[in-house]
């Protein structure tokens, strides 16, 4: 078990280094540092101002180790990322780590309730649909799922803001207040939109898993013993379907921290998602690459956690 | 070569390719029965997809001359597509509601009262016209991206699965590196790095979407490699290249088709999000939706831009999703077995 986890961690480290190299090529070699400076300062910036800006932001060194072994941007990039010393934003010189610290609270406030309710609703609905498999209820359920999956998230957001917030005035259109007593008022609508938007694919995925499971021999045996259909669904099918469910759920957890780009930005929640959107609109490359790096770091950790959690729910799985 | 000539050539090639493919499918019992089954299951969805493709093709065939643009003198000297010509001279001065007789603000009489099914936009352009033009953009995004992603995935997936060893290690490393980066962020990073053009959007979408199919084709090749007829071919001394093209790739063809259709809706949805971020493709439904967002805060509300673009997007994706699901059921023996 320990050996397995260690090997997975070693593989994870290799992938992290790969991600860092990819980001370096993309953001330092493909995009010219001169170009980054010009985008930050404007087209008409004086050459000496550009140089000064590049020096301040660490863009003035040679790119590759073979140009200068001790002082180059490749090593500097790896060092700063691996030590979580992200430096300052290209757009407004604020420390990126401060931004991240402020951002992930609001992001989690949005994504955690959305995720928990989404998973529960997804499993409940799909159990319901799978219970009535091969009937009209099942067909209708799958049809509704495909219907829901064919609508762009932009339309969900715009529709919800217009109908529920503007016409019905149940919730504010957008905004955020960290005060615990009022924060829920602002979060209801984005959480609902997030759930509605994801529910279609969620239900369809879980339904496939459940239907597949319910054709297995042990289900027939349970039925032959006289177990009721409800009991079969809840005890036998659900428990044996835990592996694919866990894979999906645990892999999604890391992304709770990075927030939701669209929901946060549309609903004015000052989390990591809107931070990223601001970075995109402001050509803030240092923030953007930090976000990609953190996202992939969390994803890799999530993958290892998934594999370990298999052995917790399924005694047949041995990690070697 | 001018863009419109190129576009015409591509249309001719596409139609020729489709005819050749149809001739092949007719002769091949396996494929023809699969497509007959698809048509039997989802006639409406298939028809809708064909309709969208037809509109996109009509918008891709263009020529110069014979176009009366009225006050727009420049347009008369540029190549205009069949769709452009169908809506020749329908331009109004500003907003008008669907099928209205007068302008939305001020109530001045329209030049073509009652002829705009989806109304007109702020510049007086017919919204139905803009919506129809979006079909070409959507199919272009899906088509070019698939042309980048699927060959890439096949190349890496098949060689990793077939040759194994070092190649497999490298491909696996590439896949896990790309897969570990958050998809949307990677997409945006690529577009920002390579500039904002249709091609770079498609390139970025291609880079972010080939990994899934690469994994599938690698797994499938691993399985195929061990089958008796491949072993027999190897024992008979058939070259590796011939084995790959004769015995491995044809057995991946159904997966290519399924992936292409299932990938399509995801690509168009991603483009809509990119449009909202201001890095989408010009003329797409995503851009129309993005622009129409502010119109909802006008009083009285302008809803037809959003409605038309949203409906067109929804209709295409719904049809494509249904066709994709049916294709998977028909072509993939694994799912077929599950159903029995």
Image (tube, coloured by chain):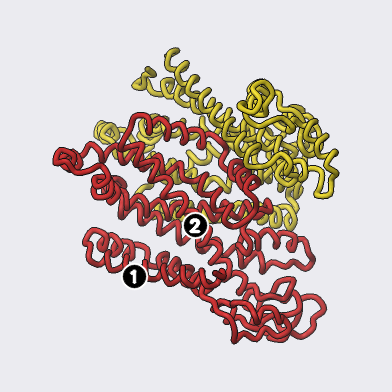
Chain colours: A yellow, B red
Where's the C terminus of chain A, which quadrant? top left
SS category of the residue bearing label 1? helix
Q: Is residue A253 depicted above or below B328 in this figure?
A: above
Extreme front residue here? A67
Q: Is residue A119 above or below residue A12?
A: below
Of A47 and A302, the residue lying toward us: A47
Q: Is the residue under label 1 in contact with that under label 2 (CB below 8 Å)?
A: no
Image point 49% across, 19% down: which residue?
Answer: A10
- Lateral position of residue B1 relative to residue B100, left or right: left
Residue B329 appears at what percent x and percent y? 33, 52
Q: Position of residue A124 (x, y in %)?
A: 48, 40
Mark linked to residue B191: none
Pick the residue in front: A283 or A255.
Answer: A283
Q: Badge 1 sits on which subunit?
A: B
Asked whether residue A180 appears in the rendered view, the answer is no
Disc 2 designates what residue? B144
Residue B215 appears in the figure: yes
Q: Residues within 10 Å of mark 1 (few under 14, many from 20)?
A: few
For the view shown, which residue lies furthest in the top direction?
A2
Left or right position of B314 against A230 = right
Q: Which residue is mark 1?
A: B19
**What residue is rendered at 64% in x and 40% in y?**
A260
The reply to the same-chain question for discs 2 and 1 is yes
- Read off the chain for label 2: B
Which residue shows up at 61% across the image and 58% down it?
Answer: B281
The quarter of the picture where the N terminus of chain A appears is top left
Q: Is residue A155 above or below residue A222?
A: below
x, y percent for residue A256:
61, 33
Q: Earlier in the sequence, mark 2 or mark 1?
A: 1
Question: Dot 2: what SS?
Answer: helix
Q: CA distance from mark 2 to mark 1?
A: 20 Å
Q: Residues within 10 Å of mark 2 (few under 14, many from 20)?
A: some
């Amino acid at each position: 078990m320990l050996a397995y986890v260690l090997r997975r961690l070693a593989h994870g480290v290799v992938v992290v280094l790969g991600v860092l190299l990819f980001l370096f090529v993309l953001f330092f070699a493909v995009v010219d540092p001169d170009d980054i400076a010009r985008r930050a300062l404007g087209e008409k910036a004086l050459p000496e101002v550009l140089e000064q800006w590049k020096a301040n932001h660490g863009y003035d060194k040679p790119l590759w180790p073979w140009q200068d072994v001790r002082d180059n941007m490749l090593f500097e990039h790896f060092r700063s990322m691996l030590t979580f010393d992200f430096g300052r934003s290209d757009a407004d010189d604020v420390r990126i780590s401060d931004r991240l610290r402020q951002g992930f609270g609001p992001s989690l406030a949005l994504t955690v309730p959305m995720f928990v309710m989404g998973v529960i609703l997804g499993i409940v609905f799909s159990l319901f649909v799978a219970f009535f498999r091969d009937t009209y209820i099942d067909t209708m359920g799958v049809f509704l799922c495909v219907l829901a999956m064919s609508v762009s998230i932009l339309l969900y957001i715009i529709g919800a803001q217009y109908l529920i917030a503007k016409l019905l005035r149940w919730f504010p259109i957008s905004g955020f207040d960290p005060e615990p007593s009022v924060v829920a008022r602002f979060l209801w609508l984005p959480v609902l939109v997030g759930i509605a938007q994801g529910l279609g694919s969620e239900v369809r995925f879980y339904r496939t898993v459940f239907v597949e499971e319910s054709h297995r021999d042990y289900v027939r045996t349970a039925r032959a013993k006289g177990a009721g259909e409800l009991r079969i669904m809840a005890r036998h099918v659900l428990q044996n379907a835990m592996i694919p469910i866990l894979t999906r759920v645990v892999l999604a957890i890391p992304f709770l921290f990075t927030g939701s780009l669209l929901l946060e930005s549309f609903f004015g929640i000052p989390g990591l998602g809107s931070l990223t959107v601001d970075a995109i609109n402001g050509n803030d490359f240092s923030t953007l690459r930090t976000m990609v790096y953190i996202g992939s770091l969390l994803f890799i950790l999530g993958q290892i956690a998934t594999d370990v959690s298999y052995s917790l729910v399924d005694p047949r799985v041995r990690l070697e | 070569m001018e863009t419109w000539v190129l576009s015409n050539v591509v249309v001719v090639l596409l139609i020729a390719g489709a005819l050749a493919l149809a001739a092949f499918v007719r002769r091949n019992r396996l494929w023809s029965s699969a497509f007959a089954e698809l048509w039997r299951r989802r006639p409406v969805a298939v028809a809708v997809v064909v309709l969208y493709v037809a509109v996109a093709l009509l918008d891709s065939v263009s020529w110069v001359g014979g176009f009366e643009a009225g006050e727009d003198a420049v347009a008369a000297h540029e190549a205009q597509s069949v769709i452009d010509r169908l809506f020749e001279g329908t331009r109004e001065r500003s907003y008008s509601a669907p099928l209205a007789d007068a302008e939305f603000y001020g109530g001045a009489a329209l030049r073509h009262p009652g002829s705009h099914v989806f109304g007109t936009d702020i510049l007086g352009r017919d919204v139905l016209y803009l919506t129809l033009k979006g079909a070409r953009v959507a199919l272009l995004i899906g088509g070019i991206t698939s042309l980048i992603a699927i060959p890439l995935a096949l190349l890496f997936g098949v060689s990793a699965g077939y040759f194994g060893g070092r190649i497999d290690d490298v491909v696996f490393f590439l896949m896990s590196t790309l897969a570990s980066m958050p998809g949307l962020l990677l997409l945006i990073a690529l577009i920002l790095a390579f500039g904002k053009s249709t091609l770079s959007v498609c390139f970025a979408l291609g880079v972010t979407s080939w990994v899934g199919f690469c994994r599938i084709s690698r797994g499938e090749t691993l399985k195929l490699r061990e089958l008796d007829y491949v072993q027999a071919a190897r024992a008979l001394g058939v070259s590796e290249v011939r084995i790959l093209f004769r015995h491995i790739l044809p057995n991946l063809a159904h997966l290519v088709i399924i992936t292409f259709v299932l990938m399509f809706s995801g690509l168009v949805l991603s483009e809509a999000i990119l449009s909202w971020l201001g890095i989408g493709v010009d003329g797409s439904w995503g851009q129309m939706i993005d622009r129409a967002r502010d119109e909802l805060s006008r009083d009285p509300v302008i809803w037809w831009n959003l409605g038309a673009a949203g409906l067109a997007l929804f209709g295409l994706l719904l049809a494509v999703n249904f066709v994709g699901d049916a294709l998977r059921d028909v072509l993939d023996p694994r799912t077929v077995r599950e159903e029995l």
